[in-house]
Image: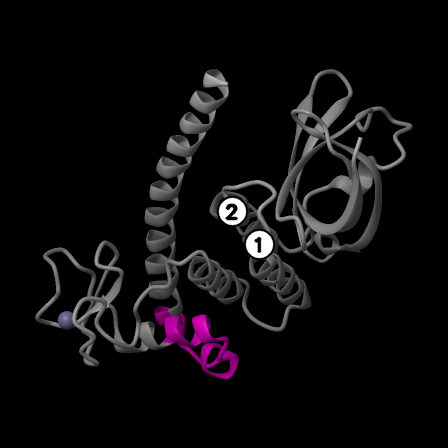
């Protein structure tokens, strides 16, 4: 059996059989990995508590035929501790973990930028420096950008004209008056500027935004993310089917 070691953020866990759990971890070097933690649901487990979502862990796994097996876990930083006492921060954190899990579809494909974004996002969220929904929207926009779905914000998604008037998810973001498809949202200019500031990491600009523009920004970002995740999930099903067919053929 091959043993490998990495550090990562626990994205989620689910039960397996009577005493085990399957733990999904976004690691620094290996990408997304799933491993079986044997016996963790027994009270005397050596490392059950270290394998909770949000925890930054140093983990060693044995490569298995179907699933890898977790051999050793150490806590690097329990990011969940700063979040559990604050409901808006906690729910924002949960949404970050879910989004990372869904945006990074392939297992064991290095996703260093996504890992760094997630660690940075959880750290910022826990620090309380910025409003939770701004941290979450910044994370959504940047993780979408890393996945190749950055929305156009400062120039028309279709013709590159620099005077944008509307936001059209299907067109890929902000559009000019001439390219605006029917039914496109018409957000305030300040809202598009806030989205651009969050995407770039311009916190002074983001922190000075008004509440109504933050609300509008959150609505647009959530809709944009949802649209891309649904398309992503559809392509994932396709990948899984191809994979299964290939295995049957061999
Ligand atoms: Zn245009």
Q: Nearer the viewer, residue 168 or 156?
A: 156
Dot 2 alpha-carbon crowd within 10 angstroms: few under 14, some 14 to 19, many 20 or more:
some
Can residue 207 be found in the magenta stretch? yes
Image location of residue 208, percent across then percent down:
46, 81
Q: What element carries label 2?
A: loop
Q: Where is residue 111 in the image (x, y as percent from the top left)?
A: 57, 54
Q: In which quarter of the image is ligand 1?
A: bottom left
Q: Is residue 202 above or below residue 77?
A: below
- The Cα atoms of the two marked residues, 1 and 2, are separated by 8 Å
The answer to which quarter of the image holds residue 197 is: bottom left
Colour approach in the figure: one colour
> Relative to 5, is 25 on the left or the right?
left
| 86 left or right of 183 in image | right
Element type where label 1 sits in the image: loop
**Taken as a whole, is the magenta stretch helix, strand or loop?**
helix
**Residue 246 - label:** none
Label located before the other in sequence (1 or 2): 2
Q: Residues within 10 Å of mark 1 (few under 14, many from 20)?
A: many
What residue do we see at 35% from left, 41% from top? Answer: 230
Q: Label 1, on which residue?
A: 111
Comparing 105 with 55, the one in front is 105
Q: Tell me the magenta residue range.
A: 194-213
Name the quadrant of the N terminus.
top right
- Mark 2 = which residue? 104
Q: In this view, does 130 lie to the left or right of 227?
A: right
């Amino acid at each position: 059996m091959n043993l490998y070691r990495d550090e990562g953020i626990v994205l989620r866990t689910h039960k397996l059989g009577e005493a085990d759990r399957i733990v999904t971890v976004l690691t620094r070097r290996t990408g997304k990995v799933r491993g079986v933690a044997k016996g963790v649901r027994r009270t005397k487990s050596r490392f059950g508590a270290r394998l909770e979502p949000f925890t930054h862990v140093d983990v060693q796994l044995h490569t298995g035929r179907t699933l890898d097996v977790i051999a050793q876990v150490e806590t690097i930083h329990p990011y969940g501790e700063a979040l559990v006492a604050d409901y808006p921060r906690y729910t924002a954190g949960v949404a970050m973990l879910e989004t990372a899990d869904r945006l990074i579809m392939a297992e064991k494909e290095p996703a260093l930028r996504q890992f760094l974004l997630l660690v940075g996002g959880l750290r910022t969220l826990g620090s309380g420096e910025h409003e939770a929904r701004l941290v979450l929207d910044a994370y959504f926009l940047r993780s979408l950008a890393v996945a190749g779905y950055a929305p156009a914000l400062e120039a028309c998604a279709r013709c590159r004209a620099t005077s944008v008037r509307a936001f059209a998810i299907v067109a890929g973001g902000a559009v000019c008056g001439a390219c605006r498809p029917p039914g496109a949202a018409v957000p305030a200019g300040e809202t598009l500027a806030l989205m651009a500031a969050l995407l770039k990491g311009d916190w002074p600009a983001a922190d000075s935004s008004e509440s109504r523009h933050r609300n509008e920004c959150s609505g647009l970002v959530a809709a944009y993310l949802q649209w891309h995740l649904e398309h992503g999930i559809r392509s994932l099903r396709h990948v899984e089917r191809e994979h299964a067919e290939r295995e049957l053929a061999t």
